[in-house]
Amino acid sequence: MDQESSTKESVGQDPLLLLKTLQTLWTKRELQKLREVARQGFATLEDPLAGLLDMLESYKGWKGKGHSLEYYITNELVHWLKEHPREPQSGLKLKKLQARAFGVLAESQSNLLEPLINIYQLQKADRNTLLGNVNHLYHKGKYKEAVILSTKLKLQPELDVEKMCTPLLLQDKANLVEDYVADYPHLQSQLLQIMDTWCHPSFNTRDIARQYQNVPPSRADKLNQKMLSKLVFRLLGQYNLDPGLCPNVMNQRHLGALRYLFYKRFVEKSMTQENWEDHIQNMVGENLWLQEQLIQLLFSYCDAATAAQWALYYHLSGECLPDKVAEKMHGLQHQERVEVTKERTCDSKMDKKNDHYYQLPIPRENIHFLHTWEEVDKCRDVVLQPGQVVGIDMEWRPSFGLVGRPRVSVLQIATKEHVYLLDLLQFSKLDQEEKEKELCHFIWKLFSDPSIIKLGYGMSGDLCSLSTTYPALREMEKQAQGILDLLQVDKQLQKNSGLWKKHHIPVESLCQEPSFITKSPRQAEKGLSLLVQNLLGKPLDKTEQLSNWEKRPLREEQILYAASDAYCLLEVYEMLCKDPAHFGLTANLKENLGGKQSTKPRAKKSLSKQATQSPPKQIARKEGRIILTSGSPYQKLQAQVGEGRCFSVNCSEKAKQQALSVLKHFNVRVAFTDVFSRCQVCNCDKYLKISKEKIRHLMKISGYLSGEDDTGCPKSPEEEWELCPKAETPTLSETVPEQLPGCTYNPDCRWLGDSDLDAESLTLKNGTTLQIRTIPLGVLEKTDLSHFYCCTQCGKVFWEGSHFGRVVSQFQEILDGSEPQTQNLYELS
């Protein structure tokens, strides 16, 4: 005992002796004992603050990833100071400590920054001293550390935002850049203007990358104009700034929208000439660059004469146009006036065979376009009757991916006998606050009344747009009741399609021309139109979907389209209610009634709540798992689980590097057989192997494959291992390096037997439904593919594709052929 006391006393006399003891514990990874010895040692040091700096200045050997011994020691001092408050340092002594702390920061990892700021009151240091240390870090190539330090000390207004943020953007550290400008609107504007200059077609980010050490030019290649444009638009919405700050990004986005409109009009042929011209003229406006791009597109899709007409309409100079267009324009210049013709600009016959589309069963006089408050009063009395069933839809002007959520122009409410179209655009122009309150009260009452069934398709998005239009309705979506979102029902129908297709009346028998649906060259129906086609026999006519819904008066085609979109919901609901069992639904559809359907952010929130109810530490203790986390959760969790059962991941690294650091830290050996050994959807490790012939047979009897229609179909982007790229998908042998012999996916699982599956319902013995509908038809034609794998827990079907080879190639440095020594890891999201 005396010897132990003597040891503690000697350790307390010299910080370097304490450091030596802590290094020994660190080498042995005895972290819990390391914390105890560190806190005991601080209590015996004459000046713990100076002692910490002595240790940090002496110990500079840590070059690895993750938390270092320096980090552990520093944080233990933070905890010790909270338990043993001391008089804060001041005067010359504090300045000396601060100067030494800045010296340590220049040589240490960035995770020491925050604790050292708190311990040595760096935020109170002289501003010139602080700026000098930031510049010192910057010129040493420690751009990340310089930005974090200036952010923590709120030095941003005194620094050049372009100088500080550019190297971080080049290194794909946009999160740090966002933190840097978060509290300074003028810096946000400057940042976006800088990023916009990078989006000019002639700009090369490699030229900037060469100016910064530690930023290889190859990293700049990843920051292409597409990625920059997405980042700029996200920040414009996040900071609520004027898009006019970013003309280059806006031009590129408008050009993309122009190309989309040309595709809809001349390739897909699903857009009327009038709608197309209206959007084109509104989008191009007085922008000379967009006008020239429009002429180029017209010349490509149509002909020189049409392009010349539009060029004269915009008074463009022939010098900036293709030669053939300039020649045609010269011949037309002798005419007194040239206007863009309202006829078709090229030979693209719009197939307006209305008989092929869903038709409203009510007379035209029962469709009411309401634009006065008195008309709304009459509508209210009809709609708000208890027990009423109404179909609801909304229309707004297409934004083509621009900033902000659109404002609703028309609100459609359909009853069995009438359809009411509320002109919200007209109401918003009237300066009558009391009447607007009455309108909002009517809408609120409609959505909050549980006795009125509200049918919609994708209702959550509609309600978000409605709350943007009327801020008074922002809380309504939380209190909405009696809503049945047929989008959710549609998803359930798709899952159960193998059950109800056999019992449902064939679509062909409901159509006057059965060949229309099976042989039409039009684009395949989707969404609500596909649901209406499957249940009512004919799809919706969507040619007015991209109309300008802010232009008044609305055309007759727009009115009929808006009415149909709302009324068809009533007929779909009625069809489902006749015999829900045939569609695999519950006997009473009203059981699915509720409020606003969960959106993706809500889903994440509920998962977070679930994680709170079942803390990771409890799961880790119960199942013997290791918690992977970072930041503040690590500090909370590391002391609540067993030693070494919590590991901090460096979030500034790419996902691959994070994975490698975890595997190397825990000495996990990974074999080829471990890659995708678990289902990516449910984490199950039990598969059934199914031959391609069996899959083809099941798809045919389930209605997913008919006759000879299983060839030449385009591949859809599914989330299976086969990540169908735009180009021809390479086979496994083309993607896996030759030095990886035997690299094929072959998990240990048995073949699917006839007794394992109910072929009619595609259900396994354990009740899991086989999800063969997710298999793109083109995959069946791959000659080098002989079998598929079905997850026995969720039914997801996978197949061997190029993604397996890419993953193996990326991680080949840690793959071996031996049996893996795996540990259970619990990732904290």
Image (cartoon, rainbow, N blue to C red):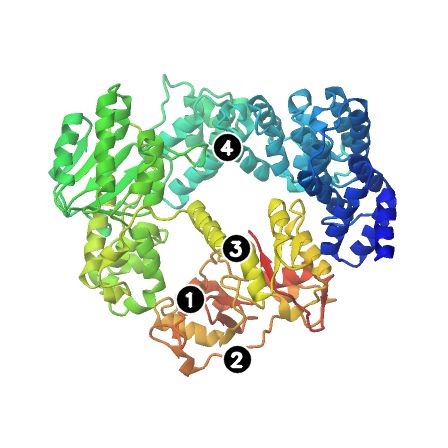
* Amino acid at pointer 3: Pro
Dot 4 alpha-carbon crowd within 10 angstroms: few under 14, some 14 to 19, many 20 or more: few
Query: Mark 4 and mark 1: span between their CA atoms?
Result: 38 Å
Q: Are marks 4 and 2 in contact (CB under 8 Å)?
A: no
* Amino acid at pointer 2: Arg
Give left or right: position of 346 versus 36: left
Q: Looking at the figure, which quarter contains the N terminus? A: bottom right
* Amino acid at pointer 1: Gln
Q: Nearer the viewer, mark 3 or mark 2?
A: 3
Q: Nearer the viewer, mark 4 or mark 1?
A: 4
Query: Mark 3 and mark 2: span between their CA atoms?
Result: 36 Å
Residue at horizontal 58 percent and vertical 27 percent from the top: 192
Q: Nearer the viewer, mark 3 or mark 4?
A: 3
Q: Secondary structure at mark 4?
A: helix
Query: Mark 1 and mark 2: span between their CA atoms?
Result: 18 Å
On screen, residue 476 above or below 668: above
Relative depth, front residue between 599 and 787: 599
4 or 1: tag closer to the N-terminus: 4
Q: Which residue is mark 1?
A: 771
Relative depth, front residue between 81 and 629: 81
Residue at horizontal 22 percent and vertical 37 percent from the top: 445
Q: Which residue is mark 2?
A: 750
Q: Which residue is mark 3?
A: 615
On screen, residue 691 above or below 153: below
Residue at horizontal 82 percent and vertical 38 percent from the top: 51
Q: Secondary structure at mark 1?
A: loop
Which of the numbered marks, if any, corresponds to residue 531? none
Dot 3 alpha-carbon crowd within 10 angstroms: few under 14, some 14 to 19, many 20 or more: few
Which of the numbered marks, if any, corresponds to residue 238? 4
Q: Secondary structure at mark 3?
A: loop
